[in-house]
Image (tube, rainbow, N blue to C red):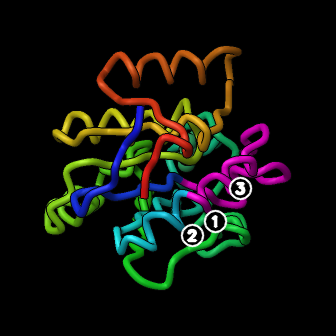
Amino acid sequence: MRVKLTPKDALIVVDVQRDFMPGGALPVPNGDAVVEPLNAYIEIFEKKGLPVFFTRDWHPENHISFKGYGGIWPPHCVQGTQGAEFHPDLKMPADNKFIISKGTSPDFDAYSGFQGTNLDNLLKERGIKRVFVGGVATDYCVKNTVLGAINLGYTVFLLTDAVKGVDVQPGDSDRAIDEMLSSGAIGIELKEVMD
Ligand code: VGL
Ligand code: ZN
């Protein structure tokens, strides 16, 4: 399938942060493999003047998702720490770039970039109807962001060559991809996107 980009399209890059990369606090196996394909998508959107949204996990140090505070995860992506920074090789555009922080208050977690953020408003203000989603982790924040976008009425393209998952249980990422596709997301790869 070939997809031609239009002014109603936006790219959403999910949580490409140091703590989710190999060596980080909550590493996604091969998580850094998403950087190169995402940079290629970013360049295409940037050249067309289309907006690129970067979500980030941005937790307080006593966040509810952390072990010791009721959650299952090691502390990760704590606000202002190096682990919360975007991957240094991620080519973030100078213009038309939006950073969406989520999971920012102690008592709420957000796996979806739409939860407790203004992402939906920012997209709607710009007349965006279709979103292209990649990043980490396939089985958590990518999945929930994709399902959130579908529920809000967007057409969603899942960038299958630019996602990686945690796989707490083997197969979680594959199951997440199946769930996104059966919920209406359209799987595409870089070579199918026409600029
Ligand atoms: C994520 C686990 C905990 C993610 C965030 O970005 O997928 N996963 N917090
Ligand atoms: Zn988190």
User: On residue 79, which mark appears?
Assistant: 2
Marks 1, 2: nearer the viewer: 1
Q: Is residue 106 left or right of residue 5?
A: right
Residue 89 falls in which quadrant of the image? bottom right
User: Which of the marked residues, 3 or 2, is nearer the chain's N terminus?
Assistant: 3
**Residue 23 lies in magenta, yes or no?**
yes
**Residue at (56% x, 74% y) in the render:** 92
Q: Is residue 69 visible?
A: no
Q: Amino acid at mark 1?
A: Ala
User: On residue 84, which mark appears?
Assistant: 1
Badge 2 marks a residue whose secondary structure is loop
Q: Could you tell me if the residues under marks 1 and 3 are in contact, i.e. CB atoms within 8 Å? A: yes
Q: Could you tell me if the residues under marks 1 and 2 are in contact, i.e. CB atoms within 8 Å? A: yes
**Residue at (72% x, 71% y) in the render:** 88
As measured in the structure, the alpha-carbon distance from the residue carrying label 1 to the one carrying label 2 is 6 Å
Q: Name the residue nearer the viewer: 7 or 27.
A: 7
Q: Quick one: quadrant of the C terminus?
A: bottom left
- Which region is colored magenta? 15-40
**Residue at (49% x, 55% y) in the render:** 13
Q: Is residue 18 left or right of residue 149?
A: right
Q: Name the residue nearer the viewer: 77 or 130.
A: 130
The residue that mark 3 highlights is 19
The quarter of the picture showing ligand 1: top right
Q: Amino acid at mark 3?
A: Asp
Badge 1 marks a residue whose secondary structure is helix
User: Which of the marked residues, 1 or 2, is nearer the chain's N terminus?
Assistant: 2
Badge 3 marks a residue whose secondary structure is helix
As measured in the structure, the alpha-carbon distance from the residue carrying label 1 to the one carrying label 3 is 6 Å
